[in-house]
Image (tube, rainbow, N blue to C red):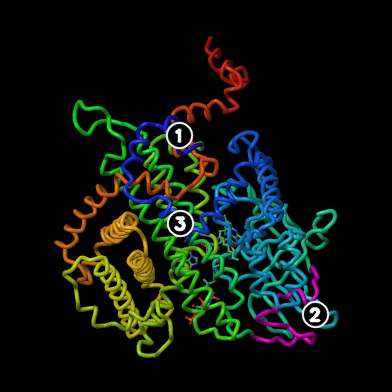
Amino acid sequence: MDKNNERECNEDLIRERRKCNFNIEELTNIVDGGKARTARRREIQRLLINDPEFLDEIPQDYMSHEDRYSNELRKSAHLMQKLADQESGHDIHQDIGALTGILKDGNPLMVHLSMFIPAILGQANSEQQEKWLGRSLRNEIIGTYAQTELGHGTFVRGLETRATYDPTVEEFVLHTPTITATKWWPGGLGKTCNYCVVMAQLYTQGRCYGPHPFIVQLRDEETHRSLPGITLGEIGPRLGLNSNDNGFLKFENHRIPRTNMLMKHSQVLKDGTYVKPLHNKLSYGTMMLVRVGIVGACSRSLQYAVTIATRYSAVRHQSEIVPGQPEPQILDYQTQQYKVIPQIASVFALIFSARSLSKIQSSVTAKLKDGNTDLLPELHSLSSGLKALSSSDASWGVEVCRLACGGHGYLASSNLPRTYTGTTCAITYEGENTVLLLQVARYLIKSYRSIGKETGASSVSYLADQTSLASSSSSFSNKALVQAFKLSALSLVAEAEARLQKLCDMGQEFYHAWNYCSVLLLKCAEAHTRYYICEKYEQTVDSLKASEGVKNVLQSLCRLYLIYHITLTHGDFLKCGALTPRNIAVLEGEMCDLLAVLRPQAVSIVDAFDIPDELLGSTLGCWDGNVYQRLYDEALKSPLNKTDVPDAYYKYLLPLMKSSL
Ligand SMILES: CCCCCCCCCCCCCCCCCC(=O)SCCNC(=O)CCNC(=O)[C@H](O)C(C)(C)COP(=O)(O)OP(=O)(O)OC[C@H]1O[C@@H](n2cnc3c(N)ncnc32)[C@H](O)[C@@H]1OP(=O)(O)O
Ligand SMILES: Cc1cc2nc3c(=O)[nH]c(=O)nc-3n(C[C@H](O)[C@H](O)[C@H](O)COP(=O)(O)OP(=O)(O)OC[C@H]3O[C@@H](n4cnc5c(N)ncnc54)[C@H](O)[C@@H]3O)c2cc1C
């Protein structure tokens, strides 16, 4: 699509784009993280878009379960080959965002890239990396991360798969003792992978040392047949991600060499002696790494959905605002603006938090190399909280965008249903959100109780700021609103801690008291993480070196985000005295003003996300706004339209209609 050729474009969209009062390319660079990154992303996307191998013969929704799998495997394999062939040597992990949309509904190599390789990088020692890293990066072996079992996903300590060390032959015996110990869910495990990292309970010298990672060959490298002692299969259709072959796995006393235990952090020596790690949760490192990645992935899903909903809202006309006048664009309804524009604001919130989190992760990783684990709990808490809020915000945001498109948003060809199912799974995988938020709460209560002790953890240092509990501000600057979030979080933590203490003082065991307070604890964790997001948003926009136009847009989006979230949880702000009922009413009014200010810029802001039509894959969200023709053309692809009268008519309908004669 030639973006300079207005003649091919819907008139409403042309008018919207003429209202733009900021430099779109500059905003695109901010979204990508710099000019060089924009150039790189575009280069990769151009490479993919122009390649006919990525086209589907028929729309995926008309394919069988098997064909979906094999079609996406074909494209995934081609993608890996193509990126490997590039002279510039693309780092697929760095460039993962550029690939969004090219593969549809999950893909069989997703967990190989996002977990198996990172597990080798983070859990294998240098000899082991020598043996497996190069081979997995070159895709000579394909792996997955097999942790979850039929009986346990959340409670990693409850896993039942056993790895028992036999010092006489220096081997581990992997065994699945019960049906509930069957590995269940790992992506690519069913039919694609020939290796995997298995999390199993380590037994040596008669003792259990908890879950540890082991690398296991599952299939013969020549024939791809599963090895003796190993049962493998696929688990069947799911809500979404149906191009992936999520699988099951059982071991029947399957032996692997001692050196297949990933030994970067803890070891089992030849005689069976266990050498413990620097920190006993280092074996959970792969999950933490991916939780960080999920925050960025969620912001991308939301960019897709909100691009579709905003463009469609500019093209779609319905009903009337002024009686008797032409039907307005639905984007002119304030209620429609309230659906769509806060989701645009949310995209930037997630982008800026994801960047801040990944900086913290890099510094924790650097410290770990020197044997310093001090900031691991801080990273665990932040990555858990941000993974939880980003996945729930993005899922809700995508769903709101789908609803904002009315009936057409329900059509597969809008690409909103698939975007939703592909986003909502992140609420569950890589740590179910409630459970992760309770981990954050645990960290908050512990930090609150150790006020005065220097931990170096900056995200919770505000808990020591007791003076702010009394100081409600009368100013409404963005900074002041962020302070209100801080006050709300601090006061919820103080309330939860006091309630816990009271129950304990009344004789309850701490763990019962914890469960009894867990709804409030969840709120603490959400408020704390929201405060973190708001603070990063405000700081990033405030310190941004940008043109006036771009800065204004981002300031308005940031302010809208702050006010929007205050109004959603206003009870917490009132309860702690951070804001008065009058303040809330004023802010609600200002939120409507902000919607009106941002309304004329909305299409241009989503244009700045710069998602090519080929990747957006939506009849409703295409650049030129030629929505109705596309909807009609897509409908014609339905196999039911191949004939005027379907066979099913003769088989079932005709006999029914004639039966009464
Ligand atoms: C190169 C990069 C590439 C990246 C690309 C990314 C691209 C993204 C794209 C998305 C694609 C993703 C596809 C992924 C598909 C899904 C894969 C999965 O679901 S896989 C399956 C995913 N499955 C899950 O996620 C399972 C979720 N469950 C769990 O993680 C754990 O069971 C648990 C954390 C909930 C509890 O663990 P438990 O052992 O019972 O611990 P307790 O509660 O008793 O707490 C004791 C103490 O430990 C502390 N601590 C805990 N963890 C950590 C940590 N990591 N650290 C530090 N500390 C930690 C805790 O704070 C506490 O401290 P204190 O208070 O005593 O001081
Ligand atoms: C699409 C998809 C892909 C996946 N890919 C992989 C993969 O590649 N590899 C892999 O190993 N796994 C994978 N999984 C599994 C996933 O990691 C688990 O499903 C997830 O960790 C949740 O665990 P669970 O299913 O045991 O949920 P459960 O823990 O049984 O959750 C059920 C309910 O119980 C609640 N609950 C549980 N424990 C607590 C608690 N302590 N406090 C309060 N509430 C609690 C939860 O909040 C939830 O409401 C995948 C899952 C999905 C959906």
Place residue 137 in its image quadrant.
bottom right
* Residue 526 seen anywhere in this rendered image of the structure: no
The residue at 24%/79% (across/down) is 468
Q: Marks 2 and 3, Cα distance to the nearest angstrom?
A: 56 Å
> Residue 87: x, y in percent?
69, 56
Query: Residue 21: percent from the left, percent from the top?
Result: 31, 48
Residue 318 against residue 141 in the figure, above or below: above
Q: Is mark 1 within 8 Å of ligand 1?
A: no
Front-lying residue, 199 or 556 = 556
Percent of width and height locating residue 425: 52, 55
Span colored in magenta: 254-276
Q: Does the segment drawn in magenta span residue 257? A: yes
> Which sits earlier in the primary sequence, circle 2 or circle 3?
3
Q: Amino acid at mark 1?
A: Asn
CA distance separating discs 2 and 1: 71 Å
Single out the mark in the foreground, 2 or 3.
Answer: 3
* Residue lying furthest top: 661
Residue annotated with mark 3: 29
Query: Image quarter for residue 575?
Result: bottom left
Number of residues whose C-alpha sits closer than 10 Å to that of mark 3, classed few (under 14), some (14–19) or many (20 or more): some
As drawn, the label of residue 166 is: 2
Of label 2 and label 1, which has the lower sequence position? Answer: 1
Q: Is residue 373 visible?
A: yes
Indicate left or right for 87 with 271 as reference: left
